[in-house]
Image (cartoon, helix red, strand yellow):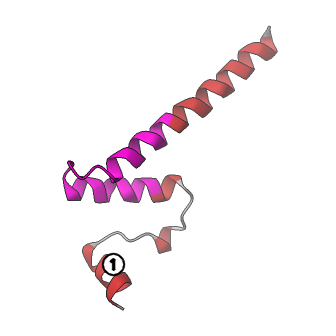
């Protein structure tokens, strides 16, 4: 019984995280959404995906420097 409860609890946590990341991912690529909102969501997705903080593009200047350099 206790093991089953723990199993369900862990399974629910995994599925909750899966859905949270899925929602963020959908938003990032939804061109009907505001570009600023999508950019903010892309930063959240990068953090959630384990991208090192110093590698995340956080400003328009960061993006310009990355793609134009």
Dot 1, how many residues are within 10 Å of its Cα: few (below 14), some (14-19), or many (20+)?
few
- Please give left or right for residue 67 compared with residue 34 in the image: right
The answer to whether residue 31 is above or below residue 22 is: below
Q: Which residues are magenta?
A: 19-45
Give the residue at x 47% y 43%. Answer: 21
Assign the N terminus to one quadrant of the image: top right
Q: Nearer the viewer, residue 53 or 30?
A: 30
Give the residue at x 57% y 59%. Answer: 50
Answer whether residue 27 is magenta in the image: yes
- Residue 36 position in % (x across, y down): 22, 58
Residue at disc 1, secondary structure: helix
- Residue 31 position in % (x across, y down): 24, 53
Total numbered badges shown on the rendered structure: 1
Q: Give the quarter of the image for residue 58.
A: bottom left
- Residue 7 position in % (x across, y down): 73, 21
- Residue 52 position in % (x across, y down): 54, 68
Give the residue at x 33% y 78%. Answer: 62
The answer to whether residue 65 is above or below residue 28 is: below
Determine the main secondary structure of the stretch shown in magenta.
Answer: helix
Can you name the residue that lies furthest to the bottom here?
A: 69
Give the residue at x 60% y 25%. Answer: 12
Answer whether residue 20 is magenta in the image: yes
Q: Please name the residue that numbered disc 1 is placed on.
A: 62
């Amino acid at each position: 019984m206790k093991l089953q409860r723990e199993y369900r609890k862990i399974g629910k946590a995994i599925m909750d995280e899966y859905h949270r990341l899925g929602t963020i991912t959908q938003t990032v690529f939804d061109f009907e959404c505001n570009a600023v909102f999508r950019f903010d969501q892309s930063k959240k997705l990068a953090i959630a995906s384990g991208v090192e903080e110093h590698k995340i593009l956080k400003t328009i200047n960061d993006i310009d420097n990355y793609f134009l350099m």
